[in-house]
Amino acid sequence: MLRKRLMLLIVLTGILQACSNSDNKDKSADADTTKMAAKQNAKPIKNILFFGTSLTAGYGLDPTEAYPALIQNRIDSLKLPYNVINGGLSGETSAAGKGRIDWLLKQKVDIFVLELGSNDGLRGVPVAETTKNLQNIIDRVKTKYPDVKMIIAGMQMPPSMGAKYASDFKNMFPELAKKNNMELIPFLLDRVGGIPKLNQADGIHPTAEGDKILAENVWVVLKPLL
């Protein structure tokens, strides 16, 4: 009698263990299925490259205050799958940009924001030369990434550079935008340029508050492309 009870207990224990193992396998399978579904539904991260001068680099500011960083904050708040790359360099000219762009294009670029030309203008570089250099950069980006979406940031020169030069320089950006099917930020420094309280002591580079406005100027054009 005792032996029968022991045998029954052993059988019941075995059945319970088998059921438990089956439940664990089912839970593990469910977890794996959930992970796979999450990976399939997750959107790949795309890169936005801001390529420009000290205005993009955030000269005189903490890196978190530069307008590309503020754009990244806006993107993150909306949970959009984009990573901002700040390719700004103080003192960068269009000619120097030609020598630097290929290195930055080693990483995939989905949206390209071109902010170059202001240092050319301040140096009095002929507009035709600046135009040629910017077109060269645009061509390299389009050749490397044919599906890239592109934006160009317009800039302006003070009248002291001469009325014709200032006019030709200003018109260069919309002309490049039209020729290359790029979106245009009419004037990057709109509502900031020439306003002392929004610029640093040099009167050229925006303060942290000024860069918030730059970020808004960029966002209006960038948002529809995301």
Image: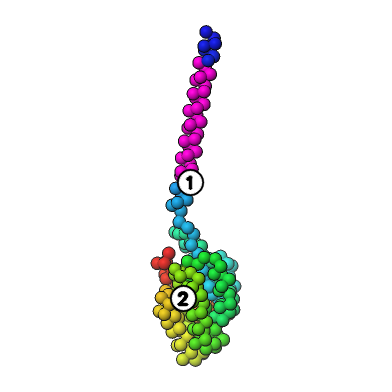
Q: Identify which residue, 217 or 106, lies in the foreground.
A: 106
Residue 178 to residue 41: above or below: below
Q: Residue 137: percent from the left, percent from the top?
A: 51, 77
Residue name at image x 58 percent, y 79 percent: 96
Residue name at image x 44 percent, y 48 percent: 37
Q: Residue 107: percent from the left, percent from the top?
A: 54, 66
Q: Identify which residue, 194 or 215, lies in the foreground.
A: 215
Q: Which mark is residue 35?
A: 1
Residue 57 in view of the camera? no
The residues colored magenta run 8-36
- Dot 2 amino acid type: Ile
Query: Of discs 2 and 1, which sits in the foreground?
Result: 1
Question: Is residue 84 shown in magenta?
Answer: no
Residue name at image x 45 percent, y 59 percent: 80
From the image, tell me which residue sits under label 2. Answer: 152
Residue name at image x 48 percent, y 37 percent: 27
Q: Residue 127: percent from the left, percent from the top?
A: 50, 87
CA neighbours of label 2 inside 10 A, class few (<14), some (14 to 19), many (20+): many
- Dot 1 amino acid type: Lys
Q: What is the image's colouring?
A: rainbow
Q: Residue 157: percent from the left, percent from the top?
A: 50, 85
Residue 138 to residue 7: above or below: below
Residue 34 in view of the camera? yes
Question: Is residue 18 shown in magenta?
Answer: yes
